[in-house]
Amino acid sequence: MSETRSDGELLRAIAADRDRHAFEELYRRYAPWLTARMRSRCADAGIVDDVVQETFLAVWRGTARHREQGASDAAGWLWRIAARRLVDALRGDGARGRLRQTLARLRHRDEASAEERVLAGVEHGDLAGALTRLSPELRAVLQATVIDGLTTREAAVLLGIPPGTVKTRALRARRQLREALA
């Protein structure tokens, strides 16, 4: 029976030795999670599958460089790669992709995503209540820029709105949260 390797050990083995077994273990560990998170962002399963595949190809080819920062940083690192790949994929899909995203959001607007459920469950002061009182548009901008770590431009592409609107909504969201928590 083999010992389970840490994420850092797997990533080092992939980068240094192109260790196929380490890569397969990392893939098994994170691909289902990453796919589920991407599907909460994009309704097109084909795009999601491509993004997940491109993310792991970047890891295998070494085009994405990992700098170990903590116990759970591999998941965040993979998420950042995938989020940027998703923005690139949606950029390439143009207006048709934005229309598909808008229709998916309208169809599932009553269903809370995993991130929204986590945000609603945060127990730090009245942050959970303040977040739930924000409009869905303001929450979406906060999620894209704060949680997902996207730039204003990337968030604009992901949400299908102009960059200026992202900035305005982020400012309004922060102001409303500040007032609610004061």
Image: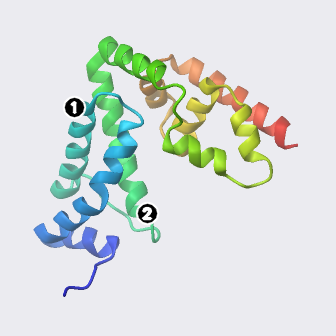
**Label 2 crowd bin: few (<14), some (14–19), many (20+), radius 10 Å:** some
Tell me the residue at 45%/66% (across/down): 72
Q: Is residue 36 above or below residue 139?
A: below
**Label 1 crowd bin: few (<14), some (14–19), many (20+), radius 10 Å:** few
The quadrant of the image that shows the N terminus is bottom left
Q: Is residue 33 visible?
A: yes
The quadrant in which residue 130 appears is: top right
| Amino acid type at image mark 2 | Asp
Answer left or right for 63 relative to 69. Answer: left
Q: In this view, does 134 lie above or below 10?
A: above
| Amino acid type at image mark 1 | Gly
Q: Where is residue 164 in the image (x, y as percent from the top left)?
A: 57, 18
Residue that mark 1 sits on: 46
Disc number at residue 157? none
The quadrant of the image that shows the C terminus is top right
In the image as oriented, which residue stretches furthest toward the right? 182
Answer left or right for 151 relative to 96. Answer: right
Q: Where is residue 95 in the image (x, y as percent from the top left)?
A: 33, 12
Disc number at residue 73? 2
In the image as oriented, which residue stretches furthest toward the bottom? 1
Mark toward the viewer: 1 or 2? 1
Q: In this view, does 68 lie above or below 132?
A: below
Tell me the residue at 80%/39% (across/down): 178
